[in-house]
């Protein structure tokens, strides 16, 4: 999986795959919440989003699963940003 170190996060679409309750307690400003369980239902939506896509969660585990699934289903220019705090720190 490619690193997102060279991505301009201000121009990326940030997707947070945590549960809505977690997302409500803090998130990357401007990010969209799509819980991991809903990711398989939204593959076409992901394909149509403005790229690059950077996914995050609490630790990087769930976003990693989502990135692997979406990449295997034809979503391109997608990266695992890790924990949402990491993404915020790099913006």
Image: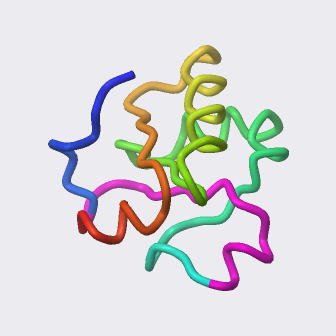
User: Is residue 22 found left or right of 58 in the rendered image?
Assistant: right
In the rendered structure, does residue 15 fall within the stretch colored magenta?
Answer: yes
Q: How is the image coloured?
A: rainbow
Q: Quadrant of residue 5?
A: top left
Foreground: 1 or 43? 1
Foreground: 60 or 46? 60
Residue drawn at (60%, 60%) of the image: 58
User: Is residue 77 found left or right of 33 in the rendered image?
Assistant: left
Q: Locate the N terminus and report the quarter of the image it occupies.
A: top left
In this view, the residue farthest toward the front is 59
Q: Position of residue 59 (x, y in %)?
A: 56, 53
In this view, the residue farthest toward the bottom is 25
- The number of callouts visible is 0
Is the residue 78 above or below the residue 83 in the image?
above
Q: Position of residue 48 (x, y in %)?
A: 54, 40
Residue drawn at (66%, 85%) of the image: 25
Q: Quadrant of residue 88?
A: bottom left
In the rendered structure, does residue 55 fall within the stretch colored magenta?
Answer: no
Residue drawn at (66%, 64%) of the image: 33
Q: Position of residue 67 (x, y in %)?
A: 56, 32
Is the residue 76 above or below the residue 51 in the image?
above
Q: Position of residue 16 (x, y in %)?
A: 59, 59
Foreground: 77 or 5? 5
Residue drawn at (61%, 41%) of the image: 61
Q: Locate the C terminus and report the quarter of the image it occupies.
A: bottom left
Is the residue 25 above or below the residue 66 in the image?
below
> Which region is colored magenta?
10-25
């Amino acid at each position: 999986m490619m690193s997102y170190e060279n991505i301009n996060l201000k121009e990326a679409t940030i997707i947070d795959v945590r549960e809505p309750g977690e997302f409500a307690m803090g998130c990357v400003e401007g990010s969209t919440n799509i819980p991991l369980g809903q990711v398989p239902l939204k593959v076409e939506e992901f394909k149509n989003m403005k790229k690059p896509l950077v996914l995050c969660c609490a630790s990087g585990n769930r976003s990693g699963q989502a990135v692997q699934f979406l990449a295997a289903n034809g979503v391109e220019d997608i990266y695992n940003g890790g924990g949402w705090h990491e993404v915020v720190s790099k913006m």
